[in-house]
Amino acid sequence: MNKRPTLTLKSSAPAAPKLRASHARALKPVVQAGFQTALKPDALAFCLLGAAHAVAQVRTGTALPQALAAVFAKQEAPPQARGAMQDIAYRCMRQLGQSETLIGLMAPKAPEPLVAALLACALALLTAPDAVAPYEAFTVVDQTVTAADAHPDTARAKGMVNAVLRRFLRERQALLDTALMQPLAKWNYPQWWLDAVKAAWPQQWQAILAAGDTAPPLTLRVNARKATVAQYLATLEAAGMAASQIGPYAVRLAKPVAVTQIPGFADGVVSVQDAGAQLAAPLLEVADGMRVLDACAAPGGKTCHILELAAAAVTALDADPKRLARVGENLERLGLQATLQAADAQAAGWWDGRPFDRILADVPCTASGIVRRHPDIRWLRRKGDTLQLATLSAKILDNLWQMLAPGGKLLFVTCSLWPQESEAQAAAFAVRHGATRLDAPGQLLPVGGQEQDHDGLFYALFQKNA
């Protein structure tokens, strides 16, 4: 949609209002989620309503990718609409604290879940900097009201939606100034998350939080069996796509595009994988013929990278058969082979008793280090999750260690920023098993910038004494 001149706001804003206590309430499940609206799929209103459904489901505990997939299926959304819904929903997740604070300042009472989600989606678009705003302000307001009128769960609130959004345009600066006095709105994270980042990284906490509120780059891994990085960069240049090398096999596109537009993706020349995640396979130093276990393997990026670097006998283990199927799909696209095993990594009944030369243990964690890529995580996790997941991960590591051959190596990986799940876990593991700790990157911090444009992963490498 073509941009129009920025809407001019009143220069003299009224006094900033106070946040209403009535907005502290538990969200209820969304009703009539499968209602088919009469909105046209190419309308912004259709996309706003679809994104709002997904956001409302996140607030009741559903991960955003699953929520969006359900919306796409129920609404029979065409590809262009799906892209717009996804973009709006992800923008909303990154600015949810600010949007919900603004709603609390303006709405006469706490809105119903779908109404609140629709307003949050609209406000995420309205608060984008003018230079990158995807739609004009008056278009967002008009289409949000149209979306509200098109669904039985929101139609009765159409007038309130219109009033709230128009008030925001009139009093924008005063409302933002008041909202940003609240840590929730300023940083867009729950308070417990803010406290945890400050405690773990007192010098870098602001940069870490800011990086998590930005969209991640599109980083590719070049398949060493099919091309070199130099060859692939030349392919991109010929296609008119700017890119740069940021690792031994890593290429970052200057502008993200759909995978269908990436040269060589369908033919297995490249895969999408964060630069930090691409460190795993080289750290294992896998040689041809080795027996390798990739525990908690889905969706298979690290499994595939191992096989791109060596002709090894790899077993990809995951407890979720559906997620394991994705590993198979990635292997097929890349022309690689591995043994897929649906089983729990803390169990031993699936193991044939033959030790592995290398084990990659990418264990369950809070995923606090990949929040820029999965912005819904901050709203889904709870403070107590850290201890629970660290306890589970310790059991998995202890179980896998018995499957490692003497002299073999185990690479412990998490995508967490919390020391309880990473460094403290690694130190305790080494003591329990008398494991030799080898050189590895340790904690990678997602603090932005060209040289640190990666997720927040942690690596610890151990060798089993012969």
Image (spheres, rainbow, N blue to C red):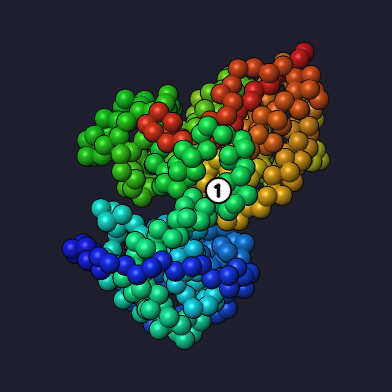
Question: What secondary structure is marked by label 1?
Answer: helix
- Give the quadrant of the C terminus: top right
Q: Residue 365 occupies which quadrant of the picture?
A: top right
Who is closer to the viewer here, 271 or 274?
A: 274
* Residue at image location 60% in from the left, 68% down from the top: 24
Q: Residue 431 occupies which quadrant of the picture?
A: top right
Q: Which residue is mark 1?
A: 326
Residue 313: in sight, yes or no?
no
Where is residue 87? Give x, y as percent: 39, 58
Q: Residue furthest top?
A: 466
354 relative to 126 in the view: left or right: right
Above or below — where is 215 with respect to 270? below
450 relative to 54 in the view: left or right: left
Above or below — where is 406 with respect to 339? above
Where is residue 384? Give x, y as percent: 72, 49
Q: Residue furthest left?
A: 5
Number of marks in picture:
1
Who is closer to the viewer here, 433 or 210?
A: 210
- Give the quadrant of the N terminus: bottom left
Which three-letter amino acid code belongs to the residue tagged 1? Arg
* Residue at image location 78% in from the left, 37% down from the top: 395
Where is residue 152? Give x, y as percent: 49, 85
* Residue at image location 49% in from the left, 78% down from the top: 108
Who is closer to the viewer here, 382 or 181?
A: 181
Who is closer to the viewer here, 457 or 93?
A: 93
Residue 183: in sight, yes or no?
yes
Q: Residues within 10 Å of mark 1 (few under 14, many from 20)?
A: some
Where is residue 310? Give x, y as percent: 54, 24
441 relative to 410 in the view: left or right: left
